Amino acid sequence: MTVGFGHCGTFWGRVGVVLIPATRHTGADTEQVMPTNVKHRSDFTETLAIHAALRAAMKQRLFAADDRVRKSAQKLVAALEGERTIYGRQLKMLALMHKGATIDTMRRRLRCSRRTIFRYLNHLENAGLSLSLEGQVYHVTGSLVKHLLK
């Protein structure tokens, strides 16, 4: 089964089912229904903001005075980056796509279904990340991705 990726945020399969349209056409008007940049609110961007703030605070040793708070922050960052959270799995997916990955590669590495991979791709694109498909290999680009993968 070949799967395509539309530049405007639409995924489709062999059966041609649109999962998330980028725009809605109503007569002569076109309404944007899917965000196109990272400034829009999404679960991924909200979690990313918390994750980045915690990492920055730990790097600056803001929690050094209180050992209990420091340990809690470390546990939270570890939990966010772990594979037991959707955000952690999406981070792993971003790392794979940064190098270039097929759906099957991502599915095997994340130990999930093809449908879950497409759902995560939709989440990432809704967050405004730039995803592309060359042949059967997905790529993600941008300075945000490089910052995430540090």
Image (cartoon, rainbow, N blue to C red):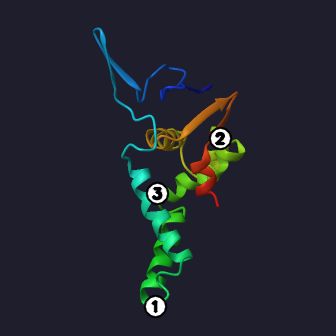
The amino acid on which the numbered mark 2 sits, given as a three-letter code, is Asp
Q: Is residue 141 left or right of residue 15?
A: right
User: What residue would you read off at disc 1?
Assistant: 65
For image coordinates 40% across by 35% down, the residue present is 35
As helix, strand or loop, the secondary structure at mark 2 comes to helix
Residue 44 placed where, x, y %? 44, 51
Would you place residue 12 above or below residue 102 in this image? above
When asked about the image quadrant of residue 68, the answer is bottom left
Residue type, mark 1 in image? Ala
Determine whether the residue tagged by mark 1 lies in a helix, strand or loop: loop
Q: Is residue 26 above or below residue 50?
A: above
Nearer the observer: mark 2 or 1; the answer is: 1
Circle 3: element type: helix
Label 3 belongs to which residue? 48
Instruction: Give coordinates of residue 135: x percent, y percent.
Output: 70, 27
Identified at 42% across, 58% down, the residue is: 47
Quadrant for the C terminus in the image = bottom right
In the picture, the disc for residue 104 is 2
Badge 3 density bin: few <14, some 14–19, many ≥20, Cα 10 Å: some
Q: CA distance from mark 2 to mark 1?
A: 46 Å
Q: Is residue 3 left or right of residue 100?
A: left
**Between tags 3 and 1, which lies in front?**
1
The crowd level at tag 2 (other Cα within 10 Å; few <14, some 14-19, many 20+) is: some
Q: Residues within 10 Å of mark 1 (few under 14, many from 20)?
A: few
Among all residues in the image, which is located at the extreme top? 28
